[in-house]
Image (tube, grey):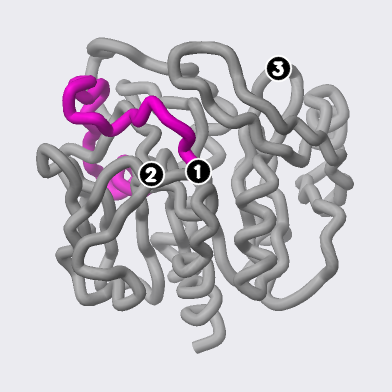
Amino acid sequence: MVIELRAQWAPRAGWTDGPLQRWSESRWQVPRGRLFEALRHGAVRVVADVPRRGPRIGLTMDLHDDVAWIKHVYVQAVWRAGGHPVLLPPGQMPTEALWRDLQGLVVTGGAVDLDPALYGQARQGRLDAIVPERSLSEMAWTAHALQSGLPLLGVCGGMQVINVVAGGTLVQDLPVWLGHEQRHDARRPGHPVRVLSPLFPWLRPVEQINSTHHQAVDRLGAGLVAAAVGPGDVLEALVMPGHPFLWGLQWHPELIGDVRPYRALLAAIRR
């Protein structure tokens, strides 16, 4: 049985405190208690109050401050690209009842790091929040997409999840001087990337992107190919050529109003 919960709208416009001065995005959320009570009775799907249209695309959610939540920009990007966003809360493993009506998947980013033990390393340097419920759920969804051929887009931390599931490793803490954690508004570009792969035809040879990460892909997982690099030859995009659609982007295109990768995901589904 699949229990459907309706997400609450939470406007959060404004600047956050701290050295990075992040813009606080409006979001959709479900109280943690309500979510885990529902999980006791079956699988849970969360829906945002947006008009239904197009293929159903799963979006992984974050878990923090007693709520499961997702930034509205992800929901908006999928909807603008022509898909219908379905929110996948942390704390559950994918089941046939959940995945059989999804046509695509987006593993989202956030201020969360994977536990280095998941890729066989001890902790080194700075680590942001580790949220096992989210990490294990996203890894299970990603593994399913790898095995089943479900079209998959990984964004920022989502790209890192793809690499770890495929057997790769991460750089746990990039040097600050490389400039990959930009100090200005993430809704504006931070540095260029050089595109290596013809499988990203919508990208220019040199693309200006935003950059909000302190970790990065190190050793590539099995079947993955580097598709773009940034300052210091840090990997900025990856692809799995043998998969119907499996792309990872280290930046946040939805924050700068770029829905091209989401449209590419939808185009692959329609093919």
**Disc sitting over residue 187 in the figure:** 1
Q: Position of residue 119 (x, y in %)?
A: 28, 30
Q: Are marks 3 and 2 in contact (CB under 8 Å)?
A: no
Residue at 78% in and 25% down: 32
> Which amino acid lies under the numbered mark 3 shown in the image of this protein?
Asp
- What secondary structure is the magenta-colored segment mainly? loop
Q: For this view, does 29 lie left or right of residue 266?
A: right
- State which tag comes first along the sequence, 2 or 1: 1
Would you place residue 179 above or below residue 18 in this image?
below
**Disc sitting over residue 210 in the figure:** 2
* Cα distance between the residues tagged 3 and 1: 24 Å
In front of the other: 9 or 118: 9
* Cα distance between the residues tagged 3 and 2: 26 Å
Quarter occupied by residue 183: top left
Q: Is residue 168 magenta?
A: yes
Q: Position of residue 71 (x, y in %)?
A: 65, 41
Q: Tell us which disc is closer to us: 3 or 2.
A: 2
Callout count: 3
Q: Are marks 2 and 1 in contact (CB under 8 Å)?
A: yes
Residue 152 visible, this angle: yes
* Cα distance between the residues tagged 2 and 1: 7 Å
> Which amino acid lies under the numbered mark 2 shown in the image of this protein?
Asn
**Disc sitting over residue 160 in the figure:** none
Magenta-colored span: 162-187
Q: Is residue 142 magenta?
A: no
- State which tag comes first along the sequence, 3 or 1: 3
**Given the current orientation, which residue lies at the most extreme left position?**
232
Quarter occupied by residue 121: top left
